Amino acid sequence: MQKKKTNVRLSKYVVPIKYDIKLHPDLENFTFGGTEVITVILLKDTKEITLHSKEIDIETVRIDKEFSQKITYNQKAETATFVFDKKIPKGRHALTISFQGILNDKMRGFYRSSYVYEGKVHNIATTQFEATDARRAFPCFDEPAQKAIFNVSLVIPKGKTAISNTLPISKVEHEAGFEVVKFAPSPKMSTYLLAFIVGDFEYIEKKSKGGVLVRVYTTPGKVHQAGFSLDCAVKVLDFYEKYFDIKYPLNTLDMIAIPDFASLAMENWGAVTYREVGLLVDENNTSLGSKQMIALVIAHELAHQWFGNLVTMEWWTHLWLNEGFASYIEFLAVDDLYPEWDIWTQFLTYEHGVALRLDGLLNTHPIEIPVHHPDEIGEIFDEVSYSKGSSVIRMLADYLGEEDFRLGLSHYLKKHSYKNTETIHLWEAFEKISKKPVAKMMQNWTGRGGYPVINASLERDNLILKQNRFFLSSISKKKANDKTIWQVPISLSNSNKTQKLFLSVEKKLVPSKDFEWLKLNQGESGFYRTAYSKELLASLYSPVLNKVLPPIDRLGIVRDLFTLAEAGVIPTIDALEFLSAYKNEDNYTVWTEIASGLSRIEQTFGKTSAKSNLDKLTINTFTPIFQKLGWEKKESDSHTDAFLRSLAIARLGRAGDKKIIDEAKRKFASSKSIHPDIRSAVYTIVATHGGIKEYNILVKMYKEETLHEEKNRIGSVLGDFQDD
Ligand code: BES
Ligand code: ZN
């Protein structure tokens, strides 16, 4: 990453306290007009005030009664500077600004979204401010630490709905069929969490145990898809209130499905916005996987209402606090709501595994990284902040224990409410509660890129553990020559007991004589990989085969083997031979790792003759589990069996299993609707083995589809066709 050195922070001597903003969006011409009064405190006398503003025409500016005669813009820094003739004395002042802007089509700032309903196009005006786009909607001090109170008023056509962070407190007639909706003052908060939405909406509502009014908004005709999310949100809210021991700070929580949305969801305080696939469930067409994803998304955004909104990072360098934490705790909440979902095992693939892969590259970056310009800030909403962040938090939670972890969080949130923090403040809270050296242990996990691989071997009666930084490529390893040493919490389990210790440079241990096998990183709670010597690996064969080891540990072993092979540390054949230990495997997440290990080898082979042997191996590997599950959903299915069935079908089909291909084609051609849980698998097989006829059918289906989830399902297989 090329670093831009420009310092883009605003000066500290202008402190915004309160914004009174009035905005008038025009849903036909896609413009908006606005006025705002920012109450500021000047910490010194000054003739100049600089704040953020981007793609906004500022018309007039005055401080108290004094108009500014000169407004200059710095496009690179995204600021406007107001120069006054006379010095403004330090103290409290009212800065009044009027301006004009465009409801853009960039899905950032104040933007327009549209949808078709009953054959007509309808428009919505909506916002997305994180990270640095509040400045596109109104001139403001657009940094997370510049918290203020917001009083929002929206001028809207009568009959439309206006939503913002708080509830409306008044509606007053305005000229020409418009009305002014004024919202209650917001809590003291960062600019990036503000939201306003204007359009035609329907909603359903429910009260949480704690008395919070929760509502889900959709565009007309979709509100019947909101029930699952509403129930989920109410339960999640109750869960967090109890878990953090802090009441949800507002009296309403709105969740709004927006037809055009850049990410999946955004945690605006009290007005969480979503892409439709992140919120809406169509009972006939939504797969169980999507439902599970929706629950996780909701749990993630609601976690931010405390962790992020109530307590906010001082600067974007500490973004990972927000995103890493929310990406961890969403699993805790969903596990509480749906214990039968086996969600923590899935964490291993969707967070931990993703992070280990990205962070094994030379071009990774530390979790905490200096960022300046908005372009750089945008770059760190990545898998390092989210998935490595959530994984190192999980490692820490395991080290602290559940109760100290929860108490530490609660202490942190209470202590820093309505304020801003850096990473160290969270460590201090955990240290205070647990009396453990958290900051020291965590230093290199957040301060350095990458992670270690632990080499475990036996020398006479000693177990030798050594660490060095892991790279997915041996070339990278040579190039980096990285000597970082991590404080690695190691848990060693064997048939009799578990032993916990810390590894820094190297350890020699005398394991109890009678162990039959030794598994490092119990529960894969540590953020590292393990490379066993041949003899230690051999000892793990039977506990995997007999499923003496729990699913997460079985998963860790096979994943590390495939990855070590990929990195050139061990021969690929070693990984493939060990695979036979999984012939009784029945856990979905373990299977996803086996599947992805095999398909990475497949990618290496491309269309060589080895590919057909690999296809045979894939078919042999997946046939037994498919035969157990079959094509149809069963009463006796566990939650994840639905995913496993679809995985097995897709793998077998892609590997050329004739029976599977024929059945997928038959299902596709039949007029009977395909169960949403296997629809993706059927589509991918049909596309992989299809021609122009199937292609045309899928394209037609894609164009006619209105449910975003189904559209994505179809769209994502269009690249699977093999015919040039
Ligand atoms: N704060 C983010 C939304 C966001 C993402 C804003 C990128 C600006 C840039 C939100 O909390 C989030 O993380 N959303 C995720 C989904 C979540 C379940 C991981 C997303 O949209 O992908
Ligand atoms: Zn988030």
Image (spheres, rainbow, N blue to C red):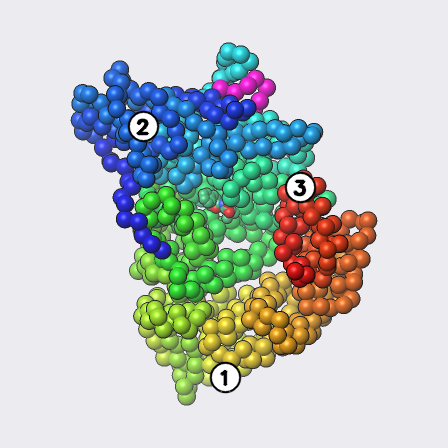
* Mark toward the viewer: 2 or 3: 3
Q: Is residue 169 above or below residue 644?
A: above
Horizontal side of residue 193 vs 331, given as left or right = left
Query: Can residue 429 be spotted in the picture?
Result: no
Query: Can residue 537 be spotted in the picture?
Result: yes
The residue positioned farthest toward the right in the image shown:
671
* Mark toward the viewer: 2 or 1: 2
* Marker disc for residue 707: 3
Q: How far apart are marks 3 and 1 (CA)?
A: 53 Å
Q: Mark 2 highlights which residue?
A: 17
Residue 453 image offset from top left, x and y in percent? 42, 71
The kind of residue on which mark 2 rests is Ile
Mark 2 C-beta to ligand 1 under 8 Å: no
Q: In this view, does 64 lie above or below 275?
A: above
Residue 674 image offset from top left, x and y in percent? 76, 51
Horizontal side of residue 245 vs 609, given as left or right = left
Residue 108 image offset from top left, x and y in percent? 46, 37
Q: Do the residues labelled 2 and 3 touch (CB within 8 Å)?
A: no
Which residue sits at x=65%, y=46%? 711
